[in-house]
Image: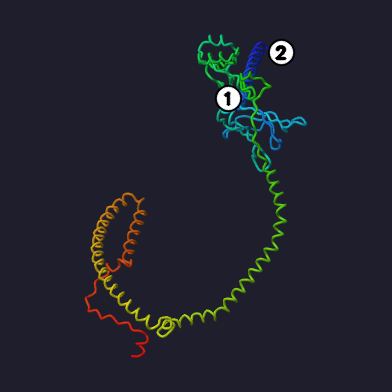
Amino acid sequence: MALQDLTPQLRTRLSRMERVVGWFVVLATLLLAAGFFYYLYHTAKRKGWFLTKAPYYTYTDTAAGLKVGDPVKLLGSEVGNITIIKPMPPGDVNNVYVEFEIAAPDNYGYLWTEGSKVKISPAGFLGQRELEVTKGKGGYATYLSFPLRDVTLAEAAGLPDLGKWHLAAEIFDAQTNLVFKARKPLSKEVLDRLGSLGLAKVPLLDTREQRKALTVVWNDTAAAYEPFAPTNHYFMLPEETPALTERLERMLAKVEVALPRFLALAGPLSQTATNASSLTSNLNFTILSAQPAISNVIYLTEQLRGRGQLGDWLIPTNLNAELETTLTNANATLVSAHAALTSADTNLTAVLQSLGKSLDELSGITSNLHAQVEANTNILSSMSDAIVHTDGLVQGLKRHWLLRSAFKEKAPASTNAPPQILRSPKDASTR
């Protein structure tokens, strides 16, 4: 049906419907575009597209386990990615060129000219490897965002905020002695010293303005900051560790070399074990054979003891008389020693009574400690050990040969029998 065949009312309703559909399509297109741009924004933010990135490069012996896009870590966190991996030309001293980027000043601000290096280490059991940069310990920041200017000394003297302008290079005298390090703030004394060195211009960093993009990169050879360009990236020393599979191959190669030697030693070791077993059997037989000889030695030692045995042959009659006199004097000495020990026993009794009082005081201390132990159970084991050691001390005093008589009860007094007179074997045989 043609549109002109419709009634005016139907044509009016159809026009309204077309306008609604048109607005719906426009709104859906706008929402779709907004969703697409929102997705692009968050993807770019997540991947660091809006962050400032500092490029670095290094060299490796092999590219095994590395690929473009692999993360670069700093202090255990992912801070960048590998951007380029390519082999060096034939004849070059280096094998593989690896370039990577570190995103955000908060990350590449850790990388300094001293202490920072890149570690290429294993990252799994399948030959993967990863790059990790280490935190710097000194020197200068590898990249900066301050403007760089070369000015004469006269211009430098008229700069505003003189202390916020820093030297962008190390300054040496004619004898190549270091006069000023880079990042030294300007001052009148610094300018006077630079003038005495005969310098026409000095490179300066304007720390009053910090830009979002990188402006300068440190040149280790020139010992100065130079303008940053896509071609002058900072070189970072590598510290490469072989892949785990390569290390396993080396270990297996060493095992293959050592295994025949070990197998060659198995025969002598078996023969040594057989000889040791035979030696043990012979040793048992030897011990059994030596038992009669040991019995004879025991019998001979028994013959050396007793009256009329070897002792009578070694000590004649005249020597025996002198020994009797000596033993008599020794007996008198022992009597005096007994009296001294009796006096010492009395003194030790008094000492031990004092010790008993000390033990009573110790008992009071232990009762106080018991209350402390109930309040603090952590010292129970220590106090138990102390009590056990104290009891061991007292028991040791009771068993000591010099003090044990003080702990015995005194026996009733009894008359001492007269000492027996020692006689020689000859006189004993005649009686």
Seen from the viewer's position, the closer of residues 330 and 144 is 330
Q: Which image quarter is the N terminus in? A: top right
On screen, residue 70 above or below 386: above
Mark 2: amino acid: Leu
- Label 1, residues with CA under 10 Å away: few <14, some 14-19, many ≥20: some
Which numbered disc flags the more N-terminal residue, 2 or 1?
Answer: 2
Q: Which image quarter is the C terminus in? A: bottom left
Residue at 64 percent of width and 12 percent of height: 12
Image position, residue 254 (x, y; %) = 70, 50
Mark 1: amino acid: Ala
Image position, residue 383 (x, y; %) = 34, 54
Q: Looking at the image, which residue sits at the far right?
A: 90
Element on which disc 2 rests: helix
Alpha carbon of mark 2 to alpha carbon of mark 1: how far?
Answer: 77 Å
Element on which disc 1 rests: strand
On screen, residue 138 above or below 354: above
> Can you identify the residue that label 2 sits on?
3
43 relative position to 375: left or right: right
Q: Name the front one of labels 2 and 1.
A: 1
Using the image, tell me which numbered label, if any, was put on residue 141. Answer: 1
Using the image, tell me which numbered label, if any, was put on residue 296. Answer: none
Tell me the quarter of the picture where residue 30 sits.
top right
